[in-house]
Image: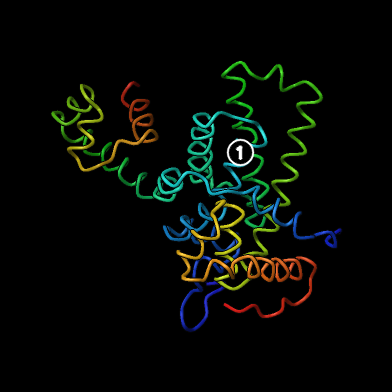
Amino acid sequence: MAGTKDNGPRPAAERSDAELVASCRAGDDRAWAELVERYSRYVYAISVQGFRLSPHDAEDVFQDTFARIYDRLDGLRDDEAFRPWLAQLTRRICLDRLRESGRTEPFEETAQLEDAADALERIDEALVVRDALGGLSVNCREILDRFFARDESYRTIGAALDLPPGTIASRISRCLGSLRERLEGRKPVAVES
Amino acid sequence: MTTSSYDESRLGALLRTLPPAPTGLVAAAAELPQTRRDLARIVQLADEDAAFRRALLEDLESALRQAGVEPDRIVVEELRKRFRA
């Protein structure tokens, strides 16, 4: 099997989308769980930030999107194109939801469409950053995710990671430096873990 | 490709753009393969056991729980579609 070494397949989190999709087709539940984990924030952000759906509608879109993806994996022609396929399907389901709730008219106004396009562009860029985050040390990933994405305080982060709260700010700064270097194609400097 | 403008504030803003989705939703989506297998088992059981089929038609959620399946929205809607036909 492609991507399999003598000592067994790599952990799901290290595999490419195409490898995970192939494993899902072969009945690997962990590969599916990893795909969901990898894209759950993306799908949710598209519906809430891109299309401004209510939390209730966003939940329905989320469930419907992953259910359809799961049911249609066999029909995906190019496994490398999983991400754009998922994005397109999510956007289509969001628009269906808006139509069902009679909210498409305001959304068809130019300003609304431009806002949505900007938000979707920002979400795609955020996903690139998140991919790069995956290449940092576990500690950096945790600190940056907890501080920025989960909006946790220094105190909460310090307690969770057993770090003095007074050191969190400097660690965040160093980890952001590593993340930037990674995004700009330079080898990140080792950050204390 | 423009990748030279990732200053700290921009990186922070982009990281904030993708907060976690609700935990329960993510867990339910991750369990879809098992949910689908449960669904197939329930349909087969209903095909083979008339009493179970009647129980499903009378009170879908209770019958599912008795069969050991959590009646989440996807399972319930799918079964309603199948048994309505």
Residue A179 figure quarter = bottom right
Residue A114 figure quarter = top right
Q: Residue at x 31, y 25 (%)?
A: B83
Q: Is residue B45 left or right of residue A14?
A: left
Q: Name the one closer to the observer, A172 or A134.
A: A172
Q: Label 1: which residue?
A: A90
Residue type beneath disc 1 = Thr
Give the vertical position of B10 relative to A117 (above or below). Answer: below
Residue under mark 1: which chain is it in? Answer: A
- Tell which residue pokes out farthest to the front in this image: A166
- Where in the figure is residue A169, as x and y percent of width and height? 64, 65
- Where in the figure is residue A30, as x and y percent of width and height? 43, 60
Q: Residue at x 57, y 46 (%)?
A: A75
Which image quadrant: the C terminus of chain A?
bottom right
Packing grade of label 1 (10 A; few <14, some 14-19, many >=20) is many
Q: Is residue A57 left or right of residue B82?
A: right
Q: Residue at x 59, y 32 (%)?
A: A93
Q: Residue at x 48, y 41 (%)?
A: A67
